[in-house]
Image: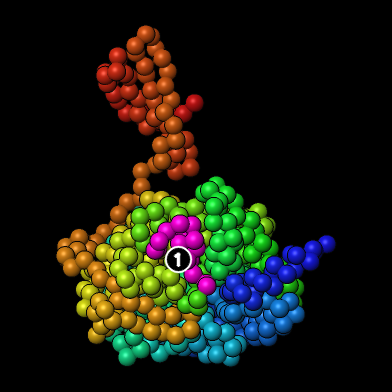
Amino acid sequence: MLRRSEILETIKMIDEQHLDIRTITMGISLLDCVDRDVDAFCDRIYKKITTLAGNLVQTGDEIARTYGIPIINKRVSVTPIALVTPGYSVEDMVKVAKTLERAAITCGINFVGGYSALVHKAATPSDLNLIRSLPIALKETSRVCSSINVATTKAGINLDAIDLMGKIIRECAEVTAEEDSIGCAKLVVFANVPEDNPFMAGAFHGVGEGDCVINVGVSGPGVVSSAIRKHPEANITEVADIVKKTAFKITRMGQMVANEACRRLNVPFGIVDLSLAPTPAVGDSVAHILEEMGLERCGTHGTTACLALLNDAVKKGGTMASSHVGGLSGAFIPVSEDAGMIEAAEIGTLTLDKLEAMTAVCSVGLDMIAIPGDTPASTISAIIADEISIGVINNKTTAVRIIPAIGKDVGDSVSFGGLLGEAPIMPVHRESSEKFISRGGRNPCPDPFFEKLKVNKKEDGIYESTVIAECLGKRCALFLFRIRRGMLDVWHPLRSVAAG
């Protein structure tokens, strides 16, 4: 039985604190649409998307009216297009993008994700042609979003792909320069990309998913900020507990909406993604949550620590509230979409270097950041390489959505409107990274994580030790050494030694 206080609390969250369902995203597999003839393929994907998602917008609107919960976006994600377009040319890829756009318009959805490629180890001809098509495809469509995965913790980092993406991002900026280079706002480069993310521009329908699924993205930075504001004297342990309890309440609402959408659409439930995704609206800012924790301004010393606490508490609270939490689930820090981040960037407290440090503990990465339009492609690639390395080494998802604003410099700004917001142009380092990027190749995956040090005392003052690690899913001993009275006495590698 719901108590009156709980009902009033939820109403207040919605009316005053910007609580909403940020997106209902229907994932659709296109694996059964594959055809070597591009026209036949386009006909099949248009028919499948419009058949399955034809009632998505209407259903979302009906649920919003029934329960009084705002559902901001209704979206579709599809199988990464490079996987289902064998032998297609660049021109064929553009035709596919335009078909996705046409299907999105027919269904009334605002974005379709999955114009994507997975090139973390190497790129196929289809991958390369899709990537090369991006400038034209993103210019000639307004609802198609693209993501390119260039690294994983297990495969390492594909520096050739990062080099290419720096050039492609510049081209996307140049061909959409009259619209503040908006093409780049629909393109994101990932490490360790999740297959069930409902948020754009990174959403796609993973190959491990079923034929069709509903994923829901919930957001509520304003609710979390308000909850912390009510306890100005709370210590940091109590703040974490407040965030967890608030995240639990938000996620439960998302679970309810997801279940109802699945019932009405007769589609299986996938996941709830509880991500504190800000908007430019006042009172809906992740930066302001960090400031409620005690920072004078987001970006000052302590920002990374506050963000780490927030991200961890959100994940813990969300996990307890839903049987299936997935996607990115945590805190987003998109500069152009967060009023507090915009303010901090404008006055110089929040810098690109500080944002990079923050991405080590948040859910995504460098997101919706505008940089000078004359930034070289190699510098863009180097920024991507830095961010991707954080994800690979820490075994987490990271991403870069960066906008070189053609014709603009530090002190100017770009404006996209709606949820994409506006952003001040942030300075980048002018020293060149071109030689590093031009080396190419693949940065190997990290060394196996050392699991423990197994120490055996042989006699007084003499110890023998074996380092145990996890390697290719199997425990193995890497080397043995002996310490005599604090000094390394004997060391030799061990081959094919089973760990005890």
Q: Is residue 40 above or below residue 498?
A: below
Residue 364: quarter of image? bottom left
**Image x and y of residue 402, in percent:** 34, 73
Residue 373 counted in the magenta span: no
- Colour mode of the rendering: rainbow
Q: Position of residue 302 (x, y in %)?
A: 39, 54
| Element under disc 1 | helix
Q: Quadrant of residue 187?
A: bottom left
Amino acid type of the residue tagged 1 in the rendering: Ala
Q: Is residue 296 magenta?
A: yes
Q: In this view, does 360 lie to the left or right of 226?
A: left
Q: Residue furthest right?
A: 1
The reply to whether residue 29 is in sight is no
Residue 113 in the image: state x and y as whole percent: 50, 76
Position of residue 27 relative to residue 137, above or below, is above
Q: In this view, does 115 lie to the left or right of 377?
A: right
Q: Which of 410 and 137 lies nearest the eye of the viewer?
A: 410
Residue at 61% of width from left, 74% of height from top? 16
Apparent side of residue 259 relative to residue 428 in the rendered image (left or right): right
In this figure, which residue is indicated by the disc labeled 1?
287
Residue farthest top in this picture: 460
Q: Where is residue 91 in the image (x, y as percent from the top left)?
A: 37, 86
The magenta region covers 283-298
Residue drawn at (49%, 61%), measured in percent from left and top?
292
> Residue 73, can we see it?
yes
- Residue at figure coordinates x 34%, y 65% from the top left: 350
- Please give the count of numbered marks on the rendered protein: 1
Residue in view at x 30 percent, y 54 percent: 443
Depicted 91 relative to depicted 5: above or below: below
Badge 1, how many Cα within 10 Å: few under 14, some, many 20+? many
Quadrant of res 368: bottom left
